[in-house]
Amino acid sequence: MNKQIIQQIEKQLCCSITHQEMVGGGCIAQTSLIETNNGESFFLKQGFKSSMFEKETNGLNELSKANVIRTPKIIATDEQYLLLENIESGSKCIDFFEKFGKAFAQLHKHLSPHYGFYEDNYIGSSQQINSFKDSWQDFYFTNRLLYQYKLAESNGYSDSDFQKAFLNIEKQFPKIIEGSEERPCLLHGDLWAGNYMVDMNGEPVLIDPAVYYGHREADLAMTKLFGGFAPDFYNSYEDEYPLIEGYEYRENIYLLYHILNHLNIFGHSYKKQALQLMNSY
């Protein structure tokens, strides 16, 4: 942590930083725990693009407005860092996933007139385009699939098979999502096992969001990208906020956005999976 950041945080907190310990926090930013001379501890993120921490702050604040799932409190934010409350990890309560699923469904009842968000933000290290649209079909294809496909082309990952598969998706997309229309709702945007934690009360905490207002099926699909959550999560969600028939058929179209994004961030190893998802239609 550089001297300037130390001075800024100490001024903000009106105390002195006495200890810093690096901790694991993903592959995007540098993360550490800091302790102060008055016995408090905080979670610090630093070392990424200058606008990332402002966007994350705004996303966490938006999630907190729904007041259904805990998010870390924002202590201070700057172009160079984000300082959050330090939430100590605990063990899942016995009905953790049942509560989590219900709360996630309640989050999705927080609505907006338009699809999108008032600013672009990030999905991992990639820019996420959130320009408002009145149509989910227009928003998702243009701001999600087409944006990532064009990025894959510019990164050299596209070939004739890839182009053919995407053109097929473009042609079929209206039919794929037909009948699933809903009002725009608040999405975490990037929820998987690494983007929630468990607090000392055994309750879920949402972290590292890629917030926008969209279709809740997109949020639920992301939870299944790396194996999914416990069945109680999905059963509880369904009890609280039943899904529209045909969700399973549409799941791959929502997974495709994230796999294209992984292709653009991490490289060729995700190309086969992207093709499989496109060819599933």
Image (tube, grey):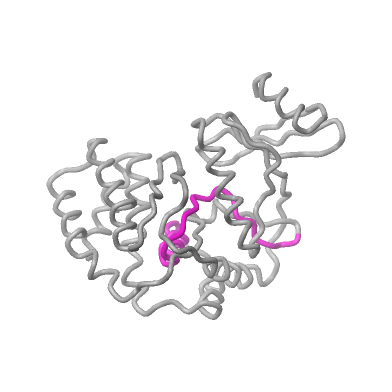
| Quadrant the N terminus occupies | top right
- Asked whether 219 falls inside the magenta stretch, the response is yes
Quadrant hosting residue 269: top left
| Quadrant the C terminus occupies | bottom left
Image coordinates for residue 82, horizontal then vertical, percent: 63, 37
Image coordinates for residue 6, horizontal then vertical, percent: 71, 24
| 6 and 276: which is toward the camera | 6
Residue positioned 67% across, 24% down in the render = 5
Residue positioned 60% across, 39% down in the render = 24
Image coordinates for residue 209, horizontal then vertical, percent: 53, 50
- Asked whether 263 falls inside the magenta stretch, the response is no
User: Can you name the residue that lies furthest to the top here?
Assistant: 3
Is 36 left, or right, of 224 in this rendering?
right
Residue positioned 53% across, 74% down in the render = 237
In the depicted structure, whether residue 47 falls above or below residue 61: above
Is 44 left, or right, of 213 in this rendering?
right
Quadrant hosting residue 124: top left
| 223 and 7: which is toward the camera | 7
Which range is magenta? 201-227
| 247 and 7: which is toward the camera | 7
Residue positioned 61% across, 32% down in the render = 78
User: Can you name the residue that lies furthest to the right here?
Assistant: 38
Report the label total.
0
Quadrant hosting residue 175: bottom left
